[in-house]
Image (spheres, rainbow, N blue to C red):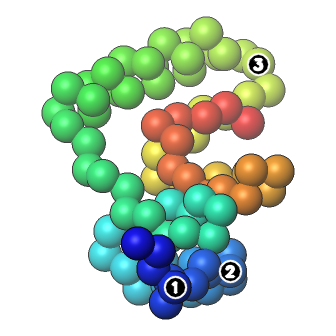
Amino acid sequence: MVDVAHRLATYAEYVAFTETAELKYEYIDGEIVAKPGGTIVHGRLIGRVTALVERALQGRPYIVLPAEVRVRILAADRATYPDLFVV
């Protein structure tokens, strides 16, 4: 059965919603989706990978950013919190 009452959100509505939300939410093609919490194993792995990437990029004009920073991908109509990313 199709939920005809379901309406997609604009990116602006998503941003407004997340400003007061206690959890993290992703934006995927107009849908606001709760981001699941991580596990201790996942957190340890991301910590190790982050340290390795930072070490590999040391002295180069890049910065490594953690999952706390939201990334918007216009071409995919998505906003997400990657585990880490390099700028």
- Please give the name of the residue rendered at 47% of the width and 45% of the height, measured from the top-left corner: 67
> Which of the marked residues, 2 or 3, is nearer the chain's N terminus?
2
**Observer able to see residue 15:** no
Residue tagged 3: 60
- Please give the name of the residue rendered at 67% of the width and 32% of the height, measured from the top-left corner: 86
Residue tagged 2: 10
SS under mark 3: loop
Q: Are the residues at dot 3 and dot 1 in contact (C-beta closer than 8 Å)?
A: no
* Amino acid carrying mark 2 in the image: Thr
25 shown above or below 6: above
Q: Quadrant of the N terminus?
A: bottom left
Q: Nearer the viewer, residue 8 or 76?
A: 8
Front label number (2 vs 3)? 2
* Amino acid carrying mark 3 in the image: Arg
Q: Nearer the viewer, residue 23 or 31?
A: 31
SS under mark 2: loop
- Please give the name of the residue rendered at 73% of the width and 36% of the height, measured from the top-left corner: 87
Q: Nearer the viewer, residue 13 or 55?
A: 13
Using the numbered discs, state the Cα–Cα distance from disc 2 to disc 1 in whole angstroms. Answer: 18 Å
> Which of the marked residues, 2 or 1, is nearer the chain's N terminus?
1
Residue tagged 1: 4
> Which of the marked residues, 3 or 1, is nearer the chain's N terminus?
1
